[in-house]
Amino acid sequence: MAFEKWKAKARKLKQEVYALYLVSKDRRVPWYARAVAVAVVAYAFSPIDLIPDPIPVLGYLDDLILIPLGIALVIKLIPAEVMQDCREKAAVTMKAGKPKNWVAGGIIILIWVSLFAFTFYYLSGIVGNF
């Protein structure tokens, strides 16, 4: 029973993030609020996390903290009537399935590959000095 409640809350959070995606396209929203909304949505819908989920505790911590904080910030920056319109549109769209942001996923992959390459380069310089 508790698992079902958790799944319902997760669906609600996904719907809220999708509503922010719709907010980011709405011209009634100030540019700075749209920019923050794009960042939150890109991270939330990315198929790859900044900190991978298999890493104990930290893997889920980014999802549990960053996404809700980003949503709260965007909601404070936009007009209430725009958010309500976007929530209604998101509810209809989310019934068809969860969208993914592959561009954001590619950026996250690029960050991880860059960190790996930098670490390898740095460590090869240290090992080469011995």
Image (cartoon, helix red, strand yellow):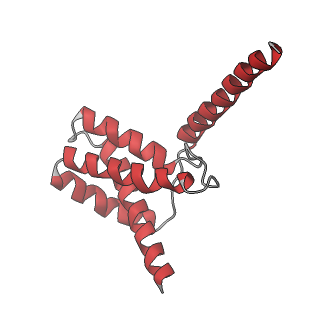
Residue sitting at 56 percent across and 47 percent down? 49
As drawn, which residue projects farthest toward the front?
A: 130
Image vertical order of residue 29 relative to residue 10, above or below: above
User: Where does the image place residue 125, in percent across and percent down from the top left?
Assistant: 75, 15
User: Where does the image place residue 118, in percent across and percent down from the top left?
Assistant: 67, 23
Count of numbered tags = 0
Residue sitting at 47 percent across and 82 percent down? 2
Along the horizontal axis of the image, is 71 left or right of 62? left
As drawn, which residue projects farthest toward the bottom?
A: 1
Q: In which quarter of the image is the C terminus?
A: top right
Along the horizontal axis of the image, is 72 left or right of 126? left
Q: Which quarter of the picture shows residue 38? A: top left
Q: Which quarter of the picture shows residue 129? A: top right
As drawn, which residue projects farthest toward the top?
A: 129
Residue placed most toward the observer, 115 or 107: 115
Residue sitting at 57 percent across and 45 percent down? 51
Residue placed most toward the observer, 93 or 1: 1
Residue placed most toward the observer, 61 or 40: 61
Residue placed most toward the observer, 52 or 100: 52
User: Where does the image place residue 84, in percent across and percent down from the top left?
Assistant: 22, 59
Residue sitting at 57 percent across and 34 percent down? 107
